[in-house]
Amino acid sequence: MRDDREQVLSQIRASLKTAHLPTARATVPPRVSAGQGERAAMLENFRRELELLGGLSFLAQSDEEAIEIVLKLLRDVGGKELLSWEDSEMPVRGLGDALQASGYTRQKVKLAKDAAERKNKLMTLERATVGITGALAGLADTGSLALLSSAARPRLASLLPPTHIALLQTSRLFPNMASFFAAYPDITREASNLAFVAGPSRTADIELVLQRGVHGPKFVHVVLCDW
Amino acid sequence: MHTPNVTFHERVDKALRDQILHTALDRATGRFQTMRLSALASLEDADAVRDRARLIRAHTLSRLDAYLEQFATNVEKAGGHVHFAADASALNEIVNEIARKHDVKTVVKGKSMISEEAELNRALESNDIRVVETDLGEYIIQLAGETPSHIVGPAIHKTKEQIGELLHEKISIPYTDDPAQMTAAARAKLRREFLEADMGISGVNFGIAETGTICLVENEGNGRLTTTAPRVHVALMGIERIVPNLDDLSVMLQVLARSATGQKITVYTNLITGPRRNGEGDGPDELHIILLDNGRSRVLGTEVAEILYCIRCGACLNACPVYREIGGHAYGSVYTGPVGAVLTPALGGIAAWNDLPQASSLCGACREVCPVRIDIPRMLLVERDQATRAGKMAWWLRLGLHLYSFTVTRPALFHAATTFSRWGSRLAAAPTNGWIKRLPPPLIGWTRSRDFPAFAKKSFREQFEASHKK
């Protein structure tokens, strides 16, 4: 396949000899440390920001409380088909059993390499009304969730269904993205996808009138596991 | 870059007469500006963050060759493919070849300015590949057969009534001017496309050299779906779109959404490092990243290299009094507004685009709002100078300037000319309260959209002499 790598790089090198780049320095000075946040303040911030974005948050003090909240949310949405991360990836013990006992089925997200099989699978996954995930972290300043993909943590669970329920441990709150990256400097080597999600999907492409729920979930509920 | 076949002045005239366009532009750019201001206010020490963002852009470009090599190595280490495209046709050729290899029939696309720049859709369609834009604004534009008029809001030149009629006609839904219903209709229509597409094509906001990661920001979820559901993901980026590491990325993200849409951060910030890994249930099996040069490496060596700092937030468009009057299409290029007025001639050649640097009053609003403080007015002047040197000045302007310099370098002649103009203008303006409604040719253009004031009774020289006699 055509590749102009050498041509492009050598033109860049030639241009850099005469480049006029105002304020360019040899290095960018390091930043003062982003610092640690205080948990109660971060929790309050996170909830406020998420709500401003149109998301909802629920505080749970135990596994049982968290399960009760999730089941209530599921009943409100309706539908029995779900997508989710594997139980080991979610911070609530006993959730899988509770879902099964209440008659919910979970489709395994496993897309084939073959084109036709892949499309068929996507069509069945599309029926799910709710996606349930954990979260690697929460960013307090923007009300965002950090979702890291893996075999047990499919991306589609937070993307395809109209409602997304995320279970976030309050011990995993960070003040902002910079402090999160400082704590996980090699995070992008661990997985092919890291998504920060700030509330329900939205658009303002028609006269800048805000609409929630476009291609991603219309509802984002975060259950804060505070124990 | 493809040059339009009507002149800049004809396009501007058309835009200025378009009342519907003005309604749409007023509604959109005004709101964009208010939201930007309140978002920046939410940032502690916004000025320091902007300074740092500028430092990062300048530093990265000063070592662009090394960072690009580091980026490419790390993408490949993660299992992705990297292609460099010297120009638009190389990019189109590469995408078509990937599509052929995977027997691609349908492509879903996230928003990409690079794709617009290279006119990729047309290149794919000529190979019988169906291309579906999935960003709502881009989808509207595609149905209308138009080009985006704004970097961030591709369809902001359209009113909701126009969009309602368009959707009614093109996707056969009952007419509505309710944005909620229109959005829901587009979602339903596009859902199936995502699931059935063979390839997803996206843009890239930043490439992270240290990790080989690409970062895509978006609000609708179409970007995440485009890069997750189809078997193959092709990401298009300009070669200048690199940042050294993740911490630098977090700085750029602090200013990007705030400047673009007034959000603290976009709903989705998607960091992709290679295709799906062993055992992963979703995500593409192949990832191709195409780096487009198309003149950027040459621009890097010129006086307007600073335009490559741009992070495509669109804030300068909303702030620009010229853009707000004429909209994006009058620029005739995919890059519009102040940034487009500099970038388009830089990439496409001043000979073909000599009018664009003139589309500014040099008021400096663009420089003021730019999150990385690009000195756009300085570069507009550089390009005006280039245009003049290239012999691109209109004959009447050249003649006028010659006459002017002939007159002002001859005191007696200058005095006679000012005396004549003063009494002439006062006479002409006498019936209309000191304002001239219509100047004679060749100055008639000036009074077409505004009045011209009569000259003062006493000239500056007379006043100066009088005050010094005392």
Image: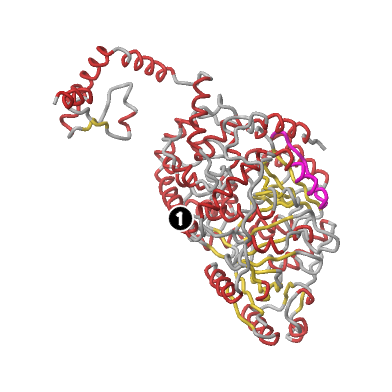
Viewer-side residue, A18 vs A203: A18
In the rendered image, residue B73, in percent from the top left (x then y), is placed at 80, 45
Q: How many marks?
A: 1
Q: Position of residue B244 (x, y in %)?
A: 69, 48
Query: For this view, does B426 lie left or right of residue A100?
Result: left
Above or below — where is B250 with respect to B297? below
The residue singled out by tag 1 in the image is B37
Q: Quadrant of the N terminus of chain A?
A: top right
Residue B218 vs residue B410, the one in the foreground: B410
Q: Is residue B158 above or below residue A200?
A: above
Which residue is outermost to the left?
B470
Residue B303 at least partly seen: yes
Location of residue B404 in the rendering, given as x and y in whole percent from the top left corner: 34, 17
Q: Which portion, as a residue range, is magenta? A: B68-87
> Mark 1 is on which residue type?
Leu
Determine crowd level at label 1: few under 14, some 14-19, many 20+ residues with C-alpha closer than 10 A: some
- The one nearer the camera, A82 or A222, is A222
> Residue at left 50%, top 48%?
B315
- Quadrant of res A129: bottom right
* Residue B11 in the image: above or below residue B268: above
Q: In the image, what residue occupies the spot 67% across and 75% down?
A: A171
